[in-house]
Image: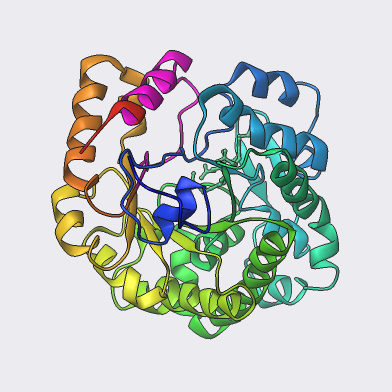
Amino acid sequence: MVDCSDSPTRKPLLRALKGEVLNPPPFWLMRQAGRYLPEYREVRGKVHGFLDLCYSAELAARLTLQPVERFGMDAAIVFSDILVVPDALGQTVEFREGEGPRLAPIRSFDALRRLSLDGFCDRLAPVYEAVRLARRALSAETALIGFAGAPWTVAAYMIEGGGSADFAAAKGWVRERPGEFRGLIDLLIEATAMHIIAQADAGAEAIQLFESWAGLLAEPRFTEWSVGPMREIVRRFKRVHPEVPVIVFPRGAGALYAKVPDGTGVEAISMDPAVSVDWAARELQSRCVVQGNLDPSVLVAGGPAMRREVERILAALGSGPFIFNLGHGVLPNTPLEHVAELARLIRRWRA
Ligand code: 1CP
């Protein structure tokens, strides 16, 4: 057992984020609130638009707590979306049933100029209220995570107008009109820093930045448009909340993962399923806390395949600073019993 008598916090997630090696490690799951939970589907069915759910503080707080109440994760993540930021900047954002997000694409300098920070935090006030409500309801052992999309990923959705396999329009902007793209990224740096500062003001105890489309950028664009903006956001955030740890998730960054800890100044890095855990143990874990990286489809499969994978990840990373998570979000067809079994496997594990 780990002696926590001299620990300033009892929350395992926050202790791990300070670099403490916990045995077993803390865990939570990206997209742990969502369609795979019947109690989520029940609440979701009562509200027309997905954004209405994000902007209803009480419902968002309730959804934040649901997975923790069922499975006892070490952290809750506030129920919201990375696309509330473009919405609060004045872009039209809609979520159509079964289709994912639709945004009025930003394709011209004029459209870019119409975005504004006026009233930004007012529009997002219900998110901060949800943070306050969820924090009040959580136990003394469970941490609350706030989050935002990193600028490149959010810009990619803003330009493309929704999800995409290759985000060709966004990549075209970067190549052909880098000056204009810089304007959009600078606006997102400012907005994102304000958004995560306000979440920490409201009680978020750690922040995760989702760079879900890091894998679309090769060097030198990765450093310029992903690492650089994240570093600037972290710098602004730490001026106000030096004690609140930041996790980044540069999904698909491959070998460029190695550039993220020093490049951004974050406490922890979250790994997608393609990152080798043995490589991470050697190259990343000496420099920061690592989080990840069970393949979400393995959680869908369950059984011996899942047990083997969980054991392999824990054996490679469990004796250093580590937070168990998935390598991407929980899939909607994930059986509840598999999540419960995963929680048991992690809790029973000893190095
Ligand atoms: O209809 C529904 O019920 C909506 C499904 C859904 C949910 C539950 C969306 C639409 N967003 C969310 C919540 C959400 N999104 C959370 C909540 C907290 C939790 O983790 O439990 C978080 C952290 C996100 C973050 C998010 N949204 C990301 C980054 C993580 C990732 O998955 O890579 C991204 C890329 C989005 C955009 C988004 N929102 C929703 C969808 C379907 C998408 C992906 C669109 C696409 O690329 O096709």
**Which image quarter is the N terminus in?**
top left
Q: Is residue 329 magenta?
A: yes
Residue at screen point 30% across, 41% down: 23
Q: Residue 111: percent from the left, percent from the top? A: 72, 70
Scheme of image coloration: rainbow
Q: Quadrant of residue 189?
A: bottom right
Q: Residue 337: percent from the left, percent from the top? A: 43, 14
Residue at screen point 66% across, 39% down: 138
Residue at screen point 49% across, 39% down: 74
Q: Which residues are magenta?
A: 323-346
Nearest to the observer: residue 319 or residue 51: 319
Lateral position of residue 207 relative to residue 25, left or right: right
Q: Is residue 13 magenta?
A: no
Task: Decide if residue 171 is in sight here.
Answer: yes
Q: Is residue 156 above or below residue 277?
A: below
Q: Is residue 107 above or below residue 313?
A: below
Lateral position of residue 158 relative to residue 124, left or right: left
